[in-house]
Image: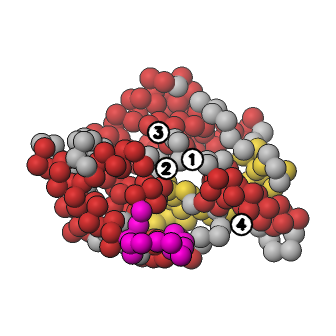
Amino acid sequence: MDDVEAWEFGRTVRRWRDRVAPGAVGVPAGRRRRASGLRREELAALAGISADYLTRLEQGRATAPSTQVVESLARALRLADPERDLLYRLAGHAAPGPDVVPSRVTPSVQRLLDRLSHTPVVVYDATWTLVLANAPYDALMGDTTSWRGLDRNAVWRNVTRLPSRVVHTPREQAEHEARLVADLRQTAARYPADRALRRLIADLAAGSPRFAELWDAEAPPPPPDPSRRKTIDHPAAGPITLDCDTLLVALDDLRISVYTAEPGTEDADRLALAVVLGTQSIQEI
């Protein structure tokens, strides 16, 4: 990415940021807003990057945005496909093709997510790498905005037993890990030319003996979890048992997990409390 491209990338992001109405992306407009578009810190929060890094990108001082950053900015800016592809080219990357695991949240899927803005929702791509988590999900499960690299991958987080608020018995945890690895193996078969996917698998195998064991296992994976219910040990609201439904967006190969409680139950009350407390905490950071 040369100096001209870096300058044009930043100028383009700034121009497109100015045209996004805050209300269109769920950002309160407020009364003291001078410009009609997004503030820099608002776009940074939507894209999951720091405001300082976005500043350097827009000023042309950061010259090597990753494909993940470009995709996050394209999603936050609600870009149509031609503009998204242009942003990739300005960043020095080829736009993702059919042989690459997609992480694109299309406008139609985004509209669906907007309608679930008060419900905990998390979106993963076919490698189980986090694409986005909404504010209620972060309030329920803990803040995801600081996750970088392998920490954004659910397979890695599970096989290395990183801290989680989800309560599993040892058997449930082992079966969950096996299901995730089996699904990743199917993804690898669908995208054999994806170099980033091959690198992810190599990193997982090098960093986790548990992953390597499951990846090389000949035994079939356990059957799908029939209950689809999860208990979350929330630090303020206490244990919350919720329905977790994972929806597959077939054409885009995305997994959307939605957490709900039966109305009128104690779990519903605790979920509402967790979302209120967690959202307030996130806004205060």
Dot 1 lies on which element?
Answer: loop
In magenta stretch: residue 267: no
Q: Which residues are magenta?
A: 26-39
Which residue is farthest right? 266
Residue indicated by mark 1: 144
- 97 to 38, vertically: above or below: above
Drawn side of residue 137 relative to residue 17, left or right: right
Q: Does the residue at mark 1 contact the one at mark 3 (Cβ under 8 Å)?
A: no
Q: Residue at x 40, y 58 (%)?
A: 40
Q: Amino acid at mark 4?
A: Thr
Q: Considering only vertical position in the picture, is 108 above or below 266?
A: below
The residue shown at (44%, 46%) is 50
Which residue bears the numbered disc 2?
A: 130
Q: What amino acid is at disc 1?
A: Thr
Residue 279 against residue 78 in the figure, above or below? above
Which residue is drawn at the image coordinates 22% and 58% (left, top)? 11
Q: Are marks 4 and 2 in contact (CB under 8 Å)?
A: no
The mark found on residue 148 in the picture is: 3
* Disc 4/disc 2 C-alpha distance (Å): 20 Å
The local crowd at label 4, few if under 14, some if 14 to 19, many if 20 or more residues have their Cα within 10 Å, is some
Q: Main secondary structure of the magenta part?
A: loop
Mark 1 vs 2: CB contact within 8 A: yes
The residue under the point 11% across, 49% down is 4
Disc 4, SS: strand
Q: Secondary structure at mark 3?
A: loop
- Name the spot of residue 103 as percent of width and height, x first: 38, 56
Q: Residues within 10 Å of mark 3 (few under 14, many from 20)?
A: few
Name the image colouring: secondary structure
Residue 33: tell me if it is visible: yes
